[in-house]
Amino acid sequence: MATAPKETNKAAQEVLLRVENVTKIYDGTVKAVDDVSLTVMKGEIFALLGGSGCGKSTLLRMMAGFETPTKGKIFLANQDITNLPPFQRPINMMFQSYALFPHLSVWENVAFGLKRDGMPKDEIADRVEKMLSLAQLNKYAKRKPHQLSGGQQQRVALVRSLAKRPQLLLLDEPLGALDKKLRETTQLELVNIIEEVGVTCVLVTHDQEEAMTMASRIAVMSEGYFLQVGAPDAVYEMPNSRKVADFIGNVNIFEGKIEEDEPDHVTVRCPECVHYVGHGVSGHPGMDVGVALRPEKIMLSKDKPNGDYNWCAGEVIEIVYFGAHTTYHLKLDSGKVIKAQELNNTRDLSCGLTWGDRAYASWNNLAMVVLTQ
Amino acid sequence: MAKTSSFFTSLSAGRLAVIGVPYFWFLLLAAIPLLIVLKISLSEMESTSISNMIDWSHGWPRLTLNFASYQFLATDSLYIKTYISSIKYALITTLLCLAIGYPFAYYMARSPKHMQPTLLMLIMLPFWTSFLLRIYAWKTLLVSNGVINNILISMHIIDTPIEMMNNSFSLLLGMVYSYLPFMILPLYANLSKMDMRYLEAASDLGTSPFKAFWLITVPLSKAGIIAGSMLVFIPAVGEYVIPELLGGSSTLMIGRVLWDEFFSNNDWPMASAVAVVMILLILVPMGIYNKAQAEQMEGK
């Protein structure tokens, strides 16, 4: 997506938001956020990704000022905002189900924040017009929120939070209320609007696709702390733990022990097969590791592959057809079930496998990630 | 086929019965009595009985409508003054109930969930005692040698009793006291349902809590304010017991005039005319207001 150029010039930019060792404890015992630190660069779109109850929303609400951290500090442009109330922060938020004021028109909703700042009337009118045209909502200006479709409401919510030109924009599950088809188009509209304005964003989502397509960096959260922070491709291709590998996309994890440990390769012996990994790993022979292998990196065939490494055999027990690709469930001789995903690049199902067939799964020596934790 | 159709007929008969009950109730206890009152108001008092509206003595029906009562109502300034005075007291009562009831309802709606049933109970508690009894109780509290004056005198705060009875103070006190729950309950129902995210959104957009209350909470509770005000204002206009027991002779309320016409003057057409005009005075503005509301909800 549009993430690559941002990633390259990130180093030249300044830090906008700094979260320092923030902890939030509810009712004296429940740790919602556990010692989290993070920096967000100016112009970045940063995603907090995790399942429900992982603390991502609590962290976002602390940035907005609706919750105060039990411990730790939050800085915006080097200014300590930890105890600043929400209405004094140059941060605006787009709420999960938009929270558009039902008694005000679209125009008044967008103008709401500007009026509170005591902006002159003609300037407000100018700004609101600009914002509405950004979201292509001009002709709906007089409507009430309940007279708009879900996608239109979402755009009103977005431009309302952008109208004050906040230094930081917070998005709480921005596409959560939309259906799948609408999400795809809206996602791009959203990113386009945000990039046009050039605002720094922190977004919260439980949807990995949403995080990957929109964000330049992702923090994967679980049980109140960060499992991994990185660019979407890094988090997907180089997960640092079983939890991250498992949370982002589908993955087969083989449990085994390191056998050979060389600077340019390692071999991992598992009950099902031997993995030959074409790069070094920080570990030692005999160490217990997991080998993560994504289903789309596995090739299936009826013929036995050559060589001693990186293949295994099993019976096809399930075939799930998705249109663009098909997922085969393979029951290995050890009893373990792995998933392999084949692209349907011809109109007949190319590899010709069916239920009960014996199939060989193989992969190349850079396809897998060795997980030490 | 025959089976399903009989099923549907029995279903529609059941539906008819369910829908019919409130209509029957309305017809029997509201519409017909109202029409009778309207009829009486257009008749004439003939010594002890009311004149017939339709006269058959000539062999054909002759309809006589007598507007004398309405004419008298419009020309005698006493009635007009009393109507204005009734509406004034009802309005003041409504505003006082709103001013006291809103903070109360707001506090209830925002207090911890486990406290709310208790607070609700406190609002309902007075209903366990008869309304009449509670008004009499106020009388004993407020009279010159009543509880409040006696305490104040014995504490040497005052030398002579304060005149608290039989004036607009005692009238309004009784009215506000009696009608306050009818203001609080719809307001509480409305405020407790309010989505707190609107307040968060307002705060996020730079609104202080005080301003957010006026810009978000109050407009969003409009339906509750209207419902509560209607529930207080409408019965307050025609209130009879409270002005009779606490208001004294100096406070004019239409309910008492009605009573006098019916039972002292025995002029039923006049009393009915007073009642009809009172209903119109309340219904017409309400109808206009409701229509405007409905149009606004359409949002065009």
Image (cartoon, rainbow, N blue to C red):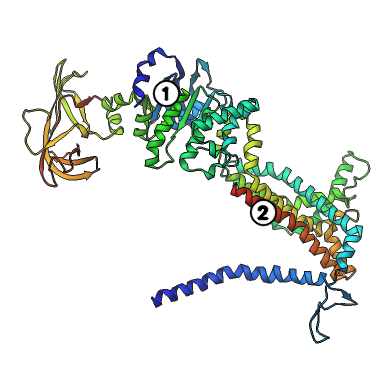
Amino acid type at circle 2 is Lys
Does residue A2 appear left or right of residue B288 in this picture? left
Q: Give the quarter of the image for residue A86.
A: top right
Q: Is residue A197 visible?
A: yes
Which chain hosts label 1?
A: A
Determine which residue is flagged by label 2. Answer: B291
The reply to whether callout 2 and callout 1 are in contact (CB within 8 Å) is no
Residue at the spot x=82%, y=71% of the render? Answer: B42
Does residue B53 appear left or right of residue A210 in this picture? right
Residue at the spot x=24%, y=40% of the render? Answer: A324
The residue nearer to you, when weighing A200 against A35, is A200
> Percent from the top left, x then y, of residue A160?
53, 32
> Does residue B174 lie above or below B262 as drawn?
above
> Does residue B58 lie above or below B183 as drawn?
below
> Percent from the top left, x then y, of residue A255?
19, 31
> Percent from the top left, x then y, of residue A218?
36, 26
Which chain hosts label 2?
A: B
Determine which residue is flagged by label 1. Answer: A35
Figure quadrant of the C terminus of chain A:
top left
The residue nearer to you, when weighing B72 against A279, is B72
Amino acid type at circle 1 is Asp
Q: Is residue A201 visible?
A: no
SS at circle 1? strand
